[in-house]
Amino acid sequence: MLKPINEEIASRRTFAIISHPDAGKTTMTEKLLYFGGAIRDAGTVKGKKSGKYATSDWMEIEKQRGISVTSSVLQFDYDNKRVNILDTPGHEDFSEDTYRTLMAVDAAVMMVDSAKGIEPQTIKLFKVCRMRGIPIFTFINKMDRQGKEPLELMEELEEVLGIQSYAMNYPIGMGKEFIGIYDRYNNRIEQARVEGDSHFLPLNEEGELAVEHPMTATSYYKQAVEDVLLLNEAGNEFDIDRVSKGELTPVFFGSALTNFGVQTFLETFLQFAPPPQPRLTKEAELVDPQSEEFSGFIFKIQANMNPAHRDRIAFVRIVSGAFERGMSVTVPRISKTVKLSQTTQFLADDRETVNEAVAGDIIGLYDTGNYQIGDTVVGGKSNFQFEALPQFTPELFVRVTAKNVMKSKHFHKGILQLVQEGAIQYYKTLHTEEVLLGAVGQLQFEVFEHRMKNEYHVEVIMEHIGSKVARWIENESDVKESMTGQRSMLVKDRFDNLVFLFENDFALRWFGDKYPDIKLYNLL
């Protein structure tokens, strides 16, 4: 490495972009990659007609539908920082994948549509970030369209999400009359639709334009100056400590589609976003990123990123120390030592072999079946495990079979690999061993069906058995088959744990009243 390892680690910035679907999250990712020099031309997620797809959307179904259903991992260098972006699925049916991704980052960028304000999926993801106490930076997008008033949007942030806000910049007009942003942090005005260095105009000590400009005659400019004065007098103060604790969110306005305000946001964000943070082990001990020994955890597994090679990649967030290709690590869950000789880093479906990486980086390990989501990997003589990643309790269930019984081998192999990715959960009935799949949302089943057909060449029949209330059992030895019935099906999960699938909440309560000694629990 060119720099000492402690400087390398301090230069890492690893964050996720979260939002409700269609708030511009993947478009923002593209523009950040563009500024980082990672791509020459920023495609948007909706570029289906032109055949120009977003760089971070690699799966065929994503290109067809114009949505992101997997978490992409993207890396570039900017301003002496190594930036790792995790572009998460926006669709709520994939919240489990997003949830795990948020376990692997040190900060989050929350995209908000200026016309729609705070939307349901944004609220859910925000709560996850708050639970982890990670810093949240807000980018209010689509200012080139008519939307809500800026002060109203900031008030909504505070009331709906319960987080205080500080406007790092402020829009001057909106829609067709969007003429720029008043940059409070850099003490300048950035003009929209103006090229070159001349699009920055300096402000004087009174907070007004220091040069003559036709803009000063507009009502939009006067309103923005008035609003900023109000924020200066009555708004929250900027406090980096409160930002670090997730109590205060810096707010930026702009338009990812027209690339306005994105570079200013990136430069400011990289100043204040935290470097790699310590992580707790199961024994509640903190692992310092600057520790000499290598450690990391697997937060995602993806099969068939290259369909030609039927590969499987385990994504590792490096928590401490340095990775070197060819090193040996231990997987404490299975007490197995593995040599890491085949490793990769990503720009969506473009990847290259990685020889070195440090805490904060995301690397991909080629997996032949050794790893599971949540696994810890450690170098040296250490033998600890990081705290477990969350698992969601599925709500929807289907019974699934292969349309062609001659393809049962491919059927079971495909299911096993896709289940290990964590998007769907696998169950089987006790005696007949019929395959049931559980998911948080319907779209997960559609993606499963699509991928089985296209990646494993197996057509499946899915029989919906509706929503169920799934509960695991603490004292399995006390369970008797006589406790099962039409409203309380007993199945096994993929780890052979017993699970009750109740018809509804009433059936669950009835069971609890009749068998009070059976201790039931659910996942998240």
Image (cartoon, helix red, strand yellow):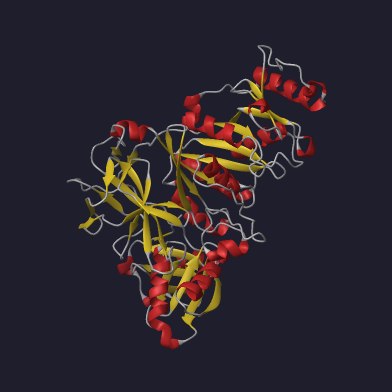
Residue closest to the eye, 196 or 16: 196
Does residue 146 appear to the left or right of 378 in the view shown? right
In the displayed structure, would residue 324 be above or below residue 427?
above
Where is residue 243 shown, x and y percent of the image? Answer: 50, 29
Residue found at x 56% / y 56%: 68
Residue found at x 57% / y 41%: 110
- Residue 6 picture quarter: top left
Where is residue 389 shown, x and y percent of the image? Answer: 39, 52
Residue found at x 60% / y 32%: 251
Where is residue 230 shown, x and y percent of the image? Answer: 70, 20
In the displayed structure, would residue 479 be above or below residue 124?
below
Does residue 112 appear to the left or right of 478 in the view shown? right
- Residue 117 picture quarter: top right
On-image quarter of the N terminus? top left
In the displayed structure, would residue 161 be above or below residue 58?
above
Say if residue 36 shows up in the picture.
yes
Residue at the outermost left position = 381
